[in-house]
Amino acid sequence: KQWYQRRVAITAGVFRVTFSTEIEGQLTTGGLGHIKFWKMAATFTGLKLQGELGKFGRTAISDVEGYVELPDGKVLSGSEWGNMLLWDGDLIKCELTQHEKQNCHKGQLQEIFLDEGELITAGADGTVKIWDFETIDGADVLEEDAHFPMEPMSDIFVGDGVNIVSMCKTVTESNNDTNSMWLAQDASGGIWKLDISVSLTKKAPEIIQSYHAGPIRGIAPCRYTHMVASIGADGTVRVFDYLTKRNLVTKKCKSGGSCITWPGRNVDSKMATLIGGFTDGVIRIMALDHAEPEAHEDFKIVLQHAFKPHKGEVTAMIIDDEGQVLVTGSADDCTLFFFDITSNYMPIGFIQLEAEVNTMSWSNSSKRVLVGLRTGVVLEVECPDPGTVDSSVTYEIQPGSLINRYEFKSIRYKIEKAAHEKIKMKQEDEQQKRLDKIKEDQGEEAFLEEKKQIDEENSKQEEMTFEAPAVPNEILKIFPLGDKFYLSLGGSDAGAIYECTFKDPLADMPVPGSMRGQWVRLKGEPLRLLELETDTTVHEITLMRDDSNVMLGMGDGTIRIHKKLEGDGL
């Protein structure tokens, strides 16, 4: 029968739900601090889904990631501490451990499978173990001690730092083959091919895919090769060959990555230097080098230098065109730090800013830095030359480096208000034309009746309000071009690019009035808006080599190419 029932399993999160392959109408759910057993019950109103919450009793309550339903209706589940719990109904029959009270796995037991009479478990400790199913199915203990000790038939240690969260059996080419090959997903970033056969000739674990575990926080292409470096929240720095689609080398760092840059030949003639920013405020200077002949990878990443200019996450890094100055910014301490690349990254000094740094770009002059803040402010700061800052007492650069300040004023709400008023004005005009025609054709009485009805309908319509955001939206990207700069923002200002300038032509002009159905630009507002017809944020803006197209990196993962307008602007 096909049936559908909706029930709330528990207020906590549910990680997994499965139907029993042996007993019809029975299913199990596991999740945050619970396991629940469900059955379909026939009532006088029809089929109802009824559940019993598993009672842990004297056993500590645990999150349940992995479990398996046994043929006789019992359920075997994992636990946070790595042991297996055998459930009979809603009660724990026994807790399976190894001898001498050692846990089956070190840490969360993630997966349990019943395959060809063998029970397979995998855990966060990077180990896969095979157990005798008949021993587990018949496990029984005395009431005084609920632990049932046993040893695995075989175990496979995949590798240090491996955290297996999912497994599936591979497909054999022939039905006569005995298949012992499995694929395992590693939460630390990889797919492993495992031979779990109980034999002396089984193959060693083989990693077939390697990738970041979690968000990629930054990428940096090499200008002269088909390689690209990436840095992830998992703290790994990776170099990929995007033609062969290979991960050439991986380096694991102590803290999560936040941004990365691959300097050009003006910094390193060999193009082997990588500079990474991390969430703990550390900058790491790394070099890409050829690995030893016996190594598994073609290259290696060697740490050359590390320093900590910021208290928290490094949110942005840029290098000037001459390859002499590295500038770093942080949202945690609201500072901008300058380093002399030619003197082994010696600090030049830092500037304390008014708010968190979100993005940076060089102005049209390589001696000026445009800084986008989370408060919607753009600052233009003078880049100090090496040796010009007195650092005998402090590295803080005294006020005076700030050249220009621009505070973004949202215009999206004004444009939406003007568009709404135009629609309303058109509607009112059509209503008036209809009233005039009724008055002409049917007389005054019909005119008044129709007008009363229209007024009642208009009064029922809710009046829409259009206001500037109470909190300024953060600046996501700055793109300088000519004597202007272009901004992308988050929040209600997303989905467009705004043309701005420090030299507002309205600076000395009176504030114009506003007319219904139109919006008038005021002092300090963007010169114009490039509408993208989307609500998605723009995170990257790049002018392509032909100077006739603009490439945009969107927040939903898409890349858009727009035709550049004629003239100096985008």
Image (cartoon, rainbow, N blue to C red):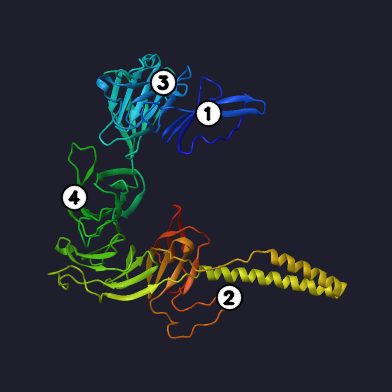
Residue lying at 47% horizontally and 21% vertically, measured from the top left: 89
Q: Earlier in the sequence, mark 2 or mark 3?
A: 3
**In this picture, residue 411 sits left or right of residue 484:** right
Q: Nearer the viewer, mark 1 or mark 3?
A: 1
The disc label shown at residue 303, or none: 4
- Within 10 Å of disc 4 (Cα), the crowding (few <14, some 14-19, many 20+) is some
The disc label shown at residue 518, or none: 2
Spatial distance from mark 4 to mark 2, Cα to Cα?
A: 58 Å
Which residue is identified by label 3? 115
Spatial distance from mark 2 to mark 1, Cα to Cα?
A: 61 Å
Spatial distance from mark 1 to mark 4, Cα to Cα?
A: 56 Å
Q: Position of residue 552 (x, y in %)?
A: 43, 60
| Three-letter code for the amino acid on which mark 3 is drawn | Asp
Residue lying at 27% horizontally and 37% vertically, measured from the top left: 161
Which residue is identified by label 1? 51
Q: Earlier in the sequence, mark 1 or mark 3?
A: 1
**In this picture, residue 518 sits left or right of residue 387:** right
Q: Position of residue 517 (x, y in %)?
A: 61, 74
| Three-letter code for the amino acid on which mark 2 is drawn | Gln
Q: Quadrant of residue 569?
A: bottom left
